[in-house]
Image (cartoon, rainbow, N blue to C red):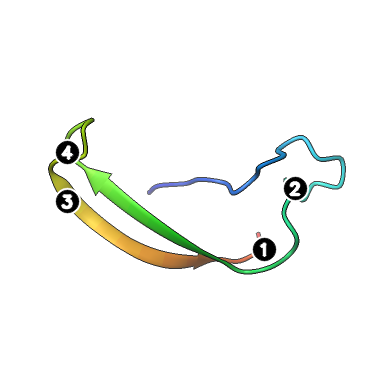
Amino acid sequence: MLWTRLAPEPLAQDGSGGLPPETYGVRYKVAEDEGFWRIVRRGAVEATPEP
């Protein structure tokens, strides 16, 4: 499992993380090495504001 949070302002008082409640497209890559030369998985998903 890979977890992340889109939050340009993680300490925003309203709990929004600084983002409006919209859906965002997110692209990801997972690699076997720190230099990201050996990519083992890549993809795109939508991040929704629902928990």
Instruction: Tell me the distance, in whole angstroms, between the alpha carbons under discs 1 and 2.
Output: 12 Å
Under mark 1, the amino acid is Pro
- x and y percent of residue 22 in the render? 68, 68
Residue furthest to the left: 38
- State the residue at coordinates (77%, 35%): 11
Name the residue that disc number 4 marks: 32
Under mark 4, the amino acid is Glu
Q: Check the picture and name the quadrant holding the C terminus.
A: bottom right
Q: Residue 49 carries which label?
A: 1
Circle 1 crowding by C-alpha within 10 Å: few under 14, some 14–19, many from 20: few
Circle 2 crowding by C-alpha within 10 Å: few under 14, some 14–19, many from 20: some
User: Going from the N terminus, do you reach mark 1 or mark 2 first?
Assistant: 2
Instruction: Tell me the distance, in whole angstroms, between the alpha carbons under discs 2 and 4.
Output: 32 Å
User: Going from the N terminus, do you reach mark 4 or mark 1 first?
Assistant: 4
Circle 3 crowding by C-alpha within 10 Å: few under 14, some 14–19, many from 20: few
Name the residue that disc number 3 marks: 40
Nearer mark to the viewer, of 2 and 4: 2
Instruction: Tell me the distance, in whole angstroms, between the alpha carbons under discs 4 and 1.
Output: 30 Å
Secondary structure under the numbered disc 1 in the rendered image: loop
Name the side, left or right, on which 46 lies relative to 13: left
Name the residue that disc number 2 marks: 18
State if disc 4 and disc 2 touch (CB < 8 Å). Answer: no
Residue 33: quarter of image: top left
- State the residue at coordinates (66%, 42%): 8
State if disc 3 and disc 2 touch (CB < 8 Å). Answer: no
State if disc 4 and disc 3 touch (CB < 8 Å). Answer: yes
User: Going from the N terminus, do you reach mark 3 or mark 4 first?
Assistant: 4
Under mark 3, the amino acid is Val
Under mark 2, the amino acid is Gly
Nearer mark to the viewer, of 1 and 2: 2
